[in-house]
Image (cartoon, grey):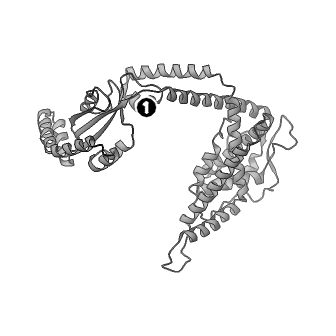
C-alpha cells in the first residue's frame, strides 16, 4: 500500500462537485453489524485506537458511490470492489497518519488553521448546496413556475441533506475530512523542515542538465514538454503577435500548392493576399503606437486572439526552436530591443510581432522550484515512513465483510 492520501481532500471534493442529487440504490451488505471491526492492527496494540468499524467504512464508501453517480446494481462490479478496497486502505492510512501526527505534535491546529478549516468547510457546504440546487428536479412544481435563486438554495439544501442521510453522514464528517487534510499537510511540513536544501539544489541542477540535453537533441520535445519552468536557453524571448489571418479558402489554396510542391505559386498567392491586408495592418500598428490596450487589439483584429490570450507574457520562442512555422521562428529574432516590432508573412496570414521581453528563469522562479522540489522530497520521505508504519502495524482486514476478496486473493 503506497502513499495515497496526501491530497485526499482535493480528490474527495473533485468527485463531490459532480454530485447529482439522485436517489442511488447502494446495495451494501445489510448483514454486517455497523459496530463490527473490519480493520485493525495485529502487530501492535493500540487499545482500539486504530480500529475501523463497518459503520466508518460504509459512510465513506456510500459517499464515493454517490459522488461518482454509481449504483452497485448497475455499475461494474469490479469497479465497485476496487472502490471498497481503496476506501478501506485510505482509512487505514488516515488512522496511522493521525496517530503519528499526534506523536509528532502535528495534530493541533493553530487558530489561523482552524479558521481556514472552517472557511473551507463553509465554502464547500455552500458549493454543494448550490450544485444540488442547480441539478435538482423541479418537475413537481406547477408548469411555468420561475425557479428563483432562493428556491434553488432551499431545494439544494434538501437534496444535499438527503444525500448525507443516505450515506449515514452528517456535515461534521465533511468538516473532519477537511481538518484531517490540514493535519496531513502539517505532517508534510514536519518532514519538510528536515529536508536539506542542498538536496533540492542538487536535484534541480541534475534536472537542468537533463533538460539541456533534451533541448540540444530534440528541441520540439523541449518546447512542448513544459521544461521552460526549470530552464530556458540563453537568448530566448517572449513574442506577442497579432495575426491578420487569411480566410479559409486562401489557406486551403496555399496548402494545396504546398502539397503539389508548387512553392512559387503558394508564395505568390500569400503575398497577394497579404497586400490586401495592408490597410488593416496599418490600423493595428497605429493602435499599438497609440498605446491601446493589448487585449482590446487582440480581440478586434487577431485571428489568434484565443491562443494569445492564454499566454499573456507572449509566446516563448527559443533559438533553434521548431514548434512554430519557419517564418515566425526566424522573425522572432529580428527585433533588437524589447518593444521593437517586425512583420512576417506565413501561410496563415500576416503576423505583427512584438519583442515583449527576454525569457529567463528568474531568481524568484528558481526559489519557487526549489521549494517545490523540497516539498516533493518531504512527501517522498513521509511516503517511505508510511510504508514502514503500514508494515509495522500489519492491519488485518475483514475482506469478506467488506466484499473485497478476489479469486486469487489470499489472507
Residue sticking out furthest to the front? 290
Task: Please rate how many residues cluster around mark 1, counting C-alpha atoms within 10 Å: few if below 14, some from 14 to 19, many from 20.
Answer: few
Q: Which is more toward the observer, 212 or 284?
A: 284
* Residue 237 in view in this figure: yes
In the shown orientation, is residue 242 left or right of residue 15? left
Compared to 117, does 263 lie above or below?
above
* Residue 251 in view in this figure: no
Image quarter in which the N terminus is found: top right
In the shown orientation, is residue 71 left or right of residue 235? right
In the shown orientation, is residue 335 left or right of residue 106? left
Q: Which is more toward the observer, 166 or 313?
A: 313
The residue identified by callout 1 is 225
Q: Position of residue 18 (x, y in %)?
A: 56, 56
Compared to 218, does 16 lie above or below?
below
Q: Which is more toward the observer, 346 or 291?
A: 291
Q: Position of residue 349 (x, y in %)?
A: 21, 41
Q: Please name the residue shown 39% across and 37% down the image.
A: 313
Q: How many numbered tags mark residues here?
A: 1
Residue 288 occupies which quadrant of the picture? top left
Q: Secondary structure at mark 1?
A: loop
Q: Position of residue 248 (x, y in %)?
A: 21, 48
Q: Position of residue 359 (x, y in %)?
A: 39, 28
Q: Please name the residue shown 70% across and 63% down the image.
A: 165
Amino acid at each position: 500500500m503506497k502513499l495515497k492520501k496526501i491530497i485526499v481532500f482535493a480528490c474527495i471534493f473533485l468527485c463531490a462537485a459532480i454530485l447529482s442529487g439522485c436517489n442511488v440504490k447502494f446495495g451494501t451488505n445489510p448483514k454486517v453489524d455497523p459496530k463490527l471491526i473490519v480493520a485493525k492492527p495485529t502487530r501492535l496494540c493500540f487499545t482500539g485506537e486504530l480500529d475501523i468499524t463497518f459503520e466508518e467504512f460504509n459512510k465513506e464508501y456510500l459517499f464515493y458511490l454517490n459522488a461518482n453517480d454509481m449504483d452497485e446494481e448497475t455499475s461494474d462490479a469490479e469497479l465497485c470492489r476496487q472502490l471498497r478496497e481503496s476506501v478501506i486502505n485510505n482509512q487505514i492510512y488516515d488512522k496511522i497518519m493521525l496517530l503519528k501526527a499526534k506523536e509528532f505534535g502535528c495534530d493541533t491546529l493553530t487558530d489561523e488553521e482552524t479558521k481556514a478549516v472552517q472557511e473551507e468547510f463553509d465554502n464547500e457546504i455552500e458549493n454543494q448546496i448550490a450544485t444540488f440546487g442547480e441539478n435538482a428536479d423541479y418537475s413537481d412544481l406547477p408548469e411555468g413556475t420561475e425557479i428563483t435563486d432562493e428556491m434553488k438554495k432551499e431545494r439544494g439544501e434538501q437534496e444535499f441533506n438527503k444525500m448525507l442521510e443516505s450515506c449515514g453522514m452528517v456535515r461534521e464528517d465533511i468538516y473532519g475530512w477537511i481538518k484531517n487534510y490540514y493535519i496531513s499537510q502539517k505532517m508534510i511540513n514536519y518532514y519538510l523542515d528536515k529536508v536539506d536544501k542542498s538536496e533540492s539544489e542538487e536535484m534541480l541542477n541534475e534536472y537542468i542538465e537533463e533538460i539541456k540535453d533534451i533541448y540540444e537533441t530534440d528541441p520540439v520535445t523541449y518546447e512542448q514538454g513544459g521544461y521552460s519552468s526549470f530552464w530556458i536557453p540563453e537568448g530566448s524571448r517572449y513574442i506577442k503577435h497579432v495575426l491578420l489571418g487569411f480566410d479559409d479558402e486562401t489557406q486551403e489554396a496555399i496548402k494545396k500548392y504546398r502539397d503539389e510542391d508548387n512553392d512559387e505559386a503558394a508564395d505568390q498567392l500569400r503575398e497577394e493576399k497579404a497586400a490586401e491586408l495592408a490597410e488593416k495592418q496599418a490600423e493595428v500598428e497605429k493602435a499599438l503606437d497609440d498605446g491601446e490596450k493589448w487585449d482590446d487589439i487582440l480581440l478586434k483584429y487577431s485571428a489568434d486572439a484565443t491562443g494569445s490570450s492564454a499566454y499573456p507574457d507572449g509566446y516563448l520562442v527559443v533559438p533553434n526552436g521548431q514548434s512554430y512555422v519557419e517564418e515566425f521562428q526566424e522573425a522572432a529574432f529580428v527585433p533588437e530591443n524589447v518593444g521593437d516590432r517586425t512583420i512576417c508573412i506565413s501561410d496563415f496570414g500576416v503576423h505583427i510581432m512584438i519583442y515583449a521581453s527576454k525569457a529567463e528563469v528568474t531568481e524568484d522562479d528558481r526559489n519557487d522550484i526549489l521549494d517545490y522540489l523540497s516539498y516533493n522530497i518531504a512527501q517522498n520521505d513521509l511516503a517511505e515512513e508510511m510504508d514502514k508504519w503500514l508494515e509495522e502495524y500489519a492491519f488485518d482486514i475483514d475482506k469478506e465483510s467488506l466484499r473485497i476478496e478476489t479469486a486469487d486473493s489470499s489472507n
